[in-house]
Amino acid sequence: MNSHHSVLTSYIVCCLLTSVIFTSQLAQARIVRIEITSRQSPTFEGKVFGQAGAYEKLRGKAYGELDPTNPQNALITDIRLAPAMQGEWLRMRWIFTFLNPSI
């Protein structure tokens, strides 16, 4: 892995973790793993967007956990109906696409 890709991956992880921290005021959750499944640089056929320049596109999967017994998570519709073993957190996964200016 080259240093640019390593810095970019660290940046994405920080962004995702920051979003979880800011939303944790509403619900208790955590990201446990992030997978980058593809990287396209430059994207949009190399088109340059003003001073931002060309962009790159990262796609991946983020895996997280959520405590269904935490009262702050009661905001989530039908959380009581989600399959979970007694005393365990719910597992979740989402697919993301991240666009950022190429460095």
Image (tube, grey):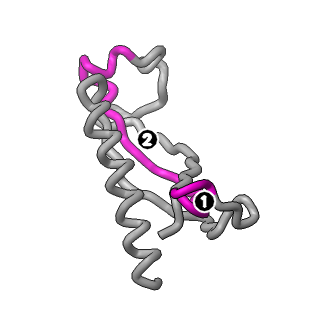
Query: Which residues are the magenta region?
Result: 49-75
Q: Which mark is residue 91?
A: 2
**Left or right placement of residue 54 versus residue 15 in this view:** right
Q: Amino acid at mark 1?
A: Lys
Q: Which residue is drawn at the image coordinates 48% and 19% (left, top)?
A: 81
**Left or right placement of residue 70 versus residue 76 in this view:** left
86 or 82, nearer to the observer: 82
- Give the quarter of the image for residue 7: bottom left
Q: Is residue 56 visible?
A: no
Q: Is residue 8 magenta?
A: no
How far across and how far down the image is residue 72, in percent? 26, 20
**Left or right placement of residue 60 versus residue 33 in this view:** right
Q: Is residue 62 magenta?
A: yes
How far across and how far down the image is residue 73, in percent? 32, 22
Q: Which residue is drawn at the image coordinates 27% and 34% (left, top)?
A: 22
- Give the quarter of the image for residue 33: bottom left
Q: Which mark is residue 7?
A: none
Q: Residue furthest right?
A: 45
Number of residues whose C-alpha sits closer than 10 Å to that of mark 1, classed few (under 14), some (14–19) or many (20 or more): some
Q: Is residue 84 visible?
A: yes
Q: Amino acid at mark 2?
A: Arg
- SS at circle 2: strand
Q: Is residue 41 above or below residue 57?
A: below
How far across and how far down the image is residue 75, in percent? 36, 15
Q: Is residue 60 above or below residue 89?
A: below
Q: How far separated are the C-alphas under marks 2 and 1?
A: 26 Å
Q: Residue furthest bottom?
A: 2
Q: Which mark is residue 57?
A: 1
Number of residues whose C-alpha sits closer than 10 Å to that of mark 2, classed few (under 14), some (14–19) or many (20 or more): some
**Left or right placement of residue 60 versus residue 26 in this view:** right
